[in-house]
Amino acid sequence: MSLTQNETQALAVCYQRLKGHMPLTVIGLVGKEGNRLTYTAKLTFAQLAEQFNLVPTGVLPETVKLQRDLVSSRTNKIQVYLKNNDDFVFPAVIAVVEALNIEALAINRAVEINLATDSYRWLVDGQGRLASIKNILSEFPEYGDNTIDVKFILSLGVEKDAQLFTDINTTPTRPNKSQCIAMDSRSILNSFAKHLVQHSPVLANKICYSKSSVTRNATSDALWTLNQVTAFILIITGLSASQSEAEFSRAERRDYWFGFINAYLNQLCANPTFDDALHTVKPALEIRQNTIIGTSVFLKSMALLGKIMMLNFIESGEAKADWSCMQSLANIDLSYNNTEWLGRCLNFRGGYEDKSFNHKAMASYFCDVLAINKPQEIIEAEIQVSQSRSQLELEVA
């Protein structure tokens, strides 16, 4: 990689800012990875914050990159994770360094790692963690004695150093949202979602824990995924993710919502196609290919309809919910070929769309069939559906 004079000058400025404030000496282990030797040691949070600067922004041109820009939302999430969890664990960070002085010790693979003050260094993987640690130490210096693994790699020039970033961030396969929810015991919302699925007579065996979505031609018996269930819960309750943590922390509220959601799902079974899908009368593959049921947009739309039903119950002032209107669902054609879905959950090319508008447009149609009151935002969505259909008719004509 041949740098221009301006690129070389900018890189020199960047490297100068990445030099240390003091020398570092730690005990670590040497390892062989491909054609490189790497050195891994434990640093305290305080040492990491002292030894490493963040890669500066606005110094290097777009054509020369050492790191991506910091994402403040991710940094904030890491800080919240540190503050809220005494049992936090961090993966190792990876440091690219200009030079190291390594001295072998008597124990196999043990080495003394010496990093000089005037040697530039930066984290090719872990800049967000570094920023979070620096921020949290400024507020809570007692965090400084926590430790983190640091893998030191000698710089081989800007091109190969940048390649490290690409290799690190493209080689691993990140777990999808459903997998994270399935393995999470910290989030109250995720725990409630799993409890709902595991104990619901309607949802049992219909939810996939390992995929972010169930495709139309998948062989799975599931119709939806666990991350879609959490979205369903947030929509039907009208809660944000943070609000749900407080709501579901109380047993009586969990019991209330568990009861309401199951009662609502049972009422949806007044539609024979939906009933067939939930009670495995027809294979899941057939349901996904021939109907709109096994889609994220349908599940979220039904969540919004459930929220509107709840609002209607509250407005009625009745002590007991009247579900009698749900019998009208029996006449709704949930097949993919029903042209009513065009402009609602399907675009005019026949593809599914899963946006807030689509949920509102779907809920509007169901509200009309059930003859229940619609919030203003649902009325406005229906107007937009009519306008888009009229526009399409003009274009065809």
Image (tube, helix red, strand yellow):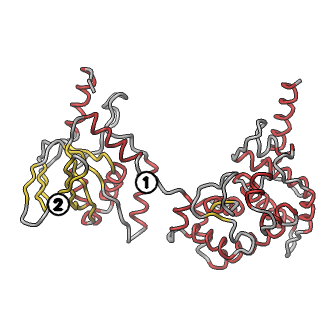
Give how far across and how far down residue 275 sits, in percent. 83, 66
Q: Name the quarter where the C terminus is drawn.
A: top right
Q: Where is residue 45 in the image (x, y as percent from the top left)?
A: 26, 60
Q: Does 284 sit left or right of 100 as displayed?
A: right
> Disc 2 or disc 1, which is closer to the eye?
2
- Alpha carbon of mark 2 to alpha carbon of mark 1: how far? 30 Å
Q: How crowded is the residue under tag 1: few (<14 C-alpha within 10 Å), some, or many (20+)?
A: some
> Could you say where residue 229 lies in the image, as x and y percent from the top left?
66, 62
Asked where in the image residue 124 lies, by quadrant, the reply is top left
| Callout 1 amino acid | Asn
**Label 2 SS:** strand
| Residue 222 in the figure: left or right of residue 396 | left
Which residue is at a point 42% across and 62% down the rendered structure image? Answer: 81
The residue tagged 2 is 28
- Give the residue drawn at x 31%, y 38%: 162
CB under 8 Å between callouts 2 and 1? no
In the displayed structure image, the side of residue 322 where residue 240 appears, left or right:
left
Depth check, front residue: 377 or 118: 118
Front one among 107 and 244? 107
**Residue at far top of view:** 5
Structural crowding at the residue carrying mark 2, measured as other residues with C-alpha within 10 Å and reported as few (<14), some (14–19) or many (≥20): many
